[in-house]
Image (cartoon, grey):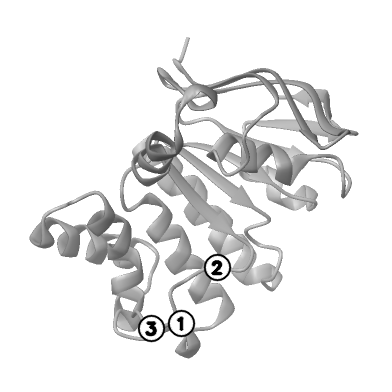
Amino acid sequence: MTQTILKVSQVRKSFGSVEVLHGVDLTLRIGERVALMGPSGSGKSTLLNCLSGIEPITSGEITLGDLRIDHADRAQIDQIRREQIGYVFQSFHLLPTLTALENIEFPGQLIGMPKKERLEQANQLLEAVGLSARAHHRPDKLSGGERQRVALARAVMHRPRLILADEPTGSLDSQSGQRVLDLLRDLSESHQIAVLLVTHDPQTTRICDRVVSMRDGRIVDSEA
């Protein structure tokens, strides 16, 4: 059986007296793509924030590989996020003053990758997402679909073990969205990166191995 890369055990999260996550259990295997679905307010984004270390959990355990995220201090969490986790967001979050190539290259700088290796890898990723001709364009000169493809290439630049994708096609037209999904699947498969994808769109689940449903801060269903 494929090795587990992410294990979430009985995770609870409260904001003041309000408990938002009620004992969540979730497991992802290396290279597995899982869609997390549920109505607004069900706790999906809060769970993603807890998995990334943005929000501390109230109780429970989160393990990425052999690293306990819930026991890590702020410096350790920052290092885990730089080295182990990639992000793809609905709003792209590209740095506006950097070109497409520089945006992709940036995570490599954060982990101290040598410049020659960074540039070679960033150019390879630009080619993989079909944007070599747009390498020196800044985000404001790119379409929404192009910006999301840059964001996707950036998310795998440092070869993370896990990608957290929060509605990655939510602001795209259907054709651009489908292309981004296909690229996400291809990059996950080629680099054996696990993906947890939050979505409201059932069409998005076609690239996933499994669908997990959340409601009222709980996992209520899991389907292969």
Residue type pointed to by label 2: Phe
Examine the image and state in which quarter residue 81 appears.
top left
Alpha-carbon distance for marks 2 and 1?
Answer: 10 Å
Residue type pointed to by label 1: Pro
In this rendered view, identify the residue nearer to me: 20 or 208. 20
- Which residue is denoted by mark 2 in the rendering? 92
Q: Residues within 10 Å of mark 1 (few under 14, many from 20)?
A: many
Residue 139 badge: 1
Residue 162 image position (x, y, % from top left)? 47, 37
Q: How many callouts does the rendering have?
A: 3
Earlier residue among tags 3 and 1: 3
Residue 201 image position (x, y, % from top left)? 78, 53
Residue contact at pointers 2 and 1, CB within 8 angstroms: yes
Q: Residues within 10 Å of mark 3 (few under 14, many from 20)?
A: few
Q: Residue at x 49, y 88 (%)?
A: 140
Earlier residue among tags 2 and 3: 2
Q: Residue at x 72, y 38 (%)?
A: 36
